[in-house]
Amino acid sequence: VVAAPGAVSAGDGLPFGNGERLLYEISWYNVVGGTASLDLEEAEYGGTSVFRVLSVAKSNNFISLFFPVEDRVESLIDRETLAAVRLDVKQRQGKRRRARVTEFDQIQHTATVVKNGERRVFSIPPDVQDSLSVLYYFRSLPNIQVGETITIDVHESNKNWRLGIVGLNRERVKTKVGEFDTIRTR
């Protein structure tokens, strides 16, 4: 992974910000099969200041001959509360294609999902996250400690989940951009 630090707005105190870009190489047994990226920018949506997170995963030319993958997921996150606002998923994996849009109403505690022209409404817990916003919400929290468990509400695949993240152990990690003290989580 290569991270390009974003310019966090003054006073935000967040470990991410406008212009952040994370790049990943997807590999199996040291054979590169594709790339993935996460891009974050500040935006407006329906009069609300949001973080727009765009995740793109794509298989390389060789893997695409057998199993093409092209996933695009866009999450809008309320800048003030860091709660999910909207999730737009477009996936192509082999011959399978999926598309769905979820609009989160954090005041009425509902998620409206539109998939294949069908509209369904689900009850959600307060300040619920989507499958992408949860990464940024978790990054905004104080560092997890070894032995600590943090629980976050997530709405995904028409269900509410309680995601438990456990701090396992401290670890020093070497990367192409340096060495870092980390906490391994599950």
Image (cartoon, helix red, strand yellow):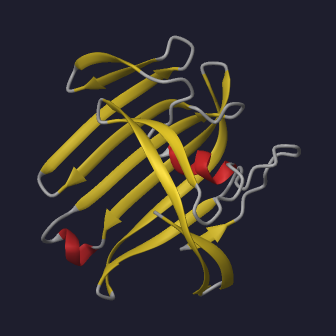
Q: Is residue 12 left or right of residue 151?
A: right
**Which percent across, then down, holds residue 11?**
88, 43
From this view, report whether residue 152 is shown above or below residue 39.
above
Q: Nearer the viewer, residue 129 or 60?
A: 129
Answer with the quarter of the image where residue 22 lies. bottom right
> Residue visible at 51% across and 31% down?
128
From this view, report whether residue 103 is shown above or below residue 3.
above
Farthest right residue?
10
**Which percent across, then down, holds residue 80?**
72, 31
Farthest top residue?
108
Answer with the quarter of the image where residue 112 lies. top left
Answer yes or no: is residue 131 visible: no
> Residue visible at 14% across and 49% down?
96
Answer yes or no: is residue 56 visible: yes
> Residue visible at 20% across and 63% down?
68
Q: Nearer the viewer, residue 131 or 60?
A: 131
From this view, report whether residue 124 is shown above or below residue 136.
above
Q: Nearer the viewer, residue 65 or 129?
A: 129
- Tally the marks: 0
Q: Is residue 118 left or right of residue 135?
A: left
Q: Is residue 45 left or right of residue 65?
A: right
From this view, report whether residue 75 is shown above or below residue 7.
above
**Which percent across, then down, holds residue 37?**
48, 62
**Which percent across, then down, holds residue 185?**
51, 65
Picture quarter with the C terminus: bottom left
Q: Is residue 70 left or right of residue 182?
A: left
